[in-house]
Image: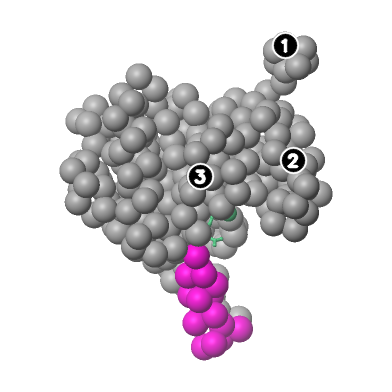
Amino acid sequence: MALIVQKYGGTSVADPRRIENVAKKVIATRDQGHQVVVVVSAMSGETNRLLALAREISPRANPREVDVILATGEQVTIGLLAIALEAQGCPARSYTGGQVRILTDSAYNKARIMEIDAARLHRDLADGSVIVVAGFQGVDEHGNITTLGRGGSDTTGVALAAALKADECQIYTDVDGVYTTDPRVVTRARRLDRVTYEEMLELASLGAKVLQIRSVEFASKYNVPLRVLSSFEDGPGTLITAEDENMEQA
Ligand code: ASP
Ligand code: MG
C-alpha cells in the first residue's frame, strides 16, 4: 500500500463531467489498495474571473481581500469532487487550506508554506476516506486566508506529499508528461520518461509552464518523487526525481 497525492489542475475539473472523471481516477487508485489525498485547482478560468471581479471594483484592491476572493475558486471544486466521490460510493472529506492548517507567512498573493498539520489527514486516511484539499491556499498565524501565487496548487500538492511522507506526488494535467518543447505548439515534441529536479527547474525557467517552479524546488528540497500525467489519457507520464545511478546508466 502506498500513500499517493494526486493534484488535478483547472482543465481537469473544468465541468461536472470532468470532475466525475477525476473521481473515477481517484477511485481506481484507491481500488489498487492505495491511500489517496487529492489536491484540486479552481475550475479553469475561475481564478481569472474572480480576479477580474475584484479589479473591476478597484485596480488597487487590498491583497488580503483579493486572497479572500481567490480562495473561493478551489473551495468550490473540493466540495464538488467530494460529492462526486461519494456519489460513486467512495467516502471522502474536503478541506480548505485553512481547515487542514496549511500555515503560511502573511505575504498575500504569494505566500510561502511554513508548516502543515498532517495529524488530522492521517486520521481520516486511516478511516479509509479520500481526502480532498483545496490547492493554492493557506492561512497565516492570525487566521487570515492567503494564496500561494498563480499555479500554486502544484506547490500545495508537493508540500502535502512532503508533510505526509507520501510515496509519490502525481500532477494530473492536460498534457501527458514533460516534453522537450511545448506539445501544444510543436507537434514533434518528445515526451520525456524521466527528468531530474535540476533539469525540470531548467525547463521551467526556459518557460515550460507544466509545473510551478516553486513546486519543483519544494520537491527537490524534500526529495518528493513527482510525476506529471494526463487526466484524459492513460500513460506513465514523466517522473521527476533526484539524479540516481540508474539514470546515469540510461
Ligand atoms: N487556481 C490557481 C490559478 O489559476 C492556482 C492553480 O490553479 O494552481 O493560478
Ligand atoms: Mg498549473
Q: Which mark is residue 233?
A: 3
The quadrant in which residue 111 appears is bottom right
Left or right: where 121 falls relative to 68: left
Q: Which residue is mark 1?
A: 245
- Total number of numbered labels? 3
Q: Position of residue 215 (x, y in %)?
A: 61, 42
- Measured in 3D between alpha carbons, the distance from the residue under mark 1 to the one under mark 3, in whole angstroms, is 30 Å
- Measured in 3D between alpha carbons, the distance from the residue under mark 2 to the one under mark 3, in whole angstroms, is 16 Å
Mark 2: give few (<14), some (14-19) or many (20+) Cα within 10 Å.
Answer: some
Q: Which residues are magenta?
A: 44-59
The residue lying toward the viewer, choosing from 218 and 27, is 27
Residue appearing at x 56%, y 32% in the figure: 236
Residue appearing at x 48%, y 75% in the figure: 50
Mark 1: give few (<14), some (14-19) or many (20+) Cα within 10 Å.
Answer: few
Mark 3: give few (<14), some (14-19) or many (20+) Cα within 10 Å.
Answer: few
The quadrant in which residue 149 appears is bottom right
Q: Position of residue 151 (x, y in %)?
A: 58, 55
Q: Is residue 45 magenta?
A: yes
Q: Position of residue 183 (x, y in %)?
A: 71, 51
Q: Say which amino acid is labelled 3.
A: Glu
Q: Is residue 120 magenta?
A: no
The kind of secondary structure element at disc 3 is loop
- Who comes first in sequence, dot 2 or dot 3? 2
Left or right: where 155 falls relative to 205: left
Q: Say which amino acid is labelled 1.
A: Glu
The quadrant in which residue 126 appears is top left
Residue appearing at x 19%, y 51% in the figure: 87
The N terminus is located in which quarter?
A: top left
Q: Say which amino acid is labelled 2.
A: Arg
- Measured in 3D between alpha carbons, the distance from the residue under mark 2 to the one under mark 1, in whole angstroms, is 23 Å
Q: Which residue is mark 2?
A: 190
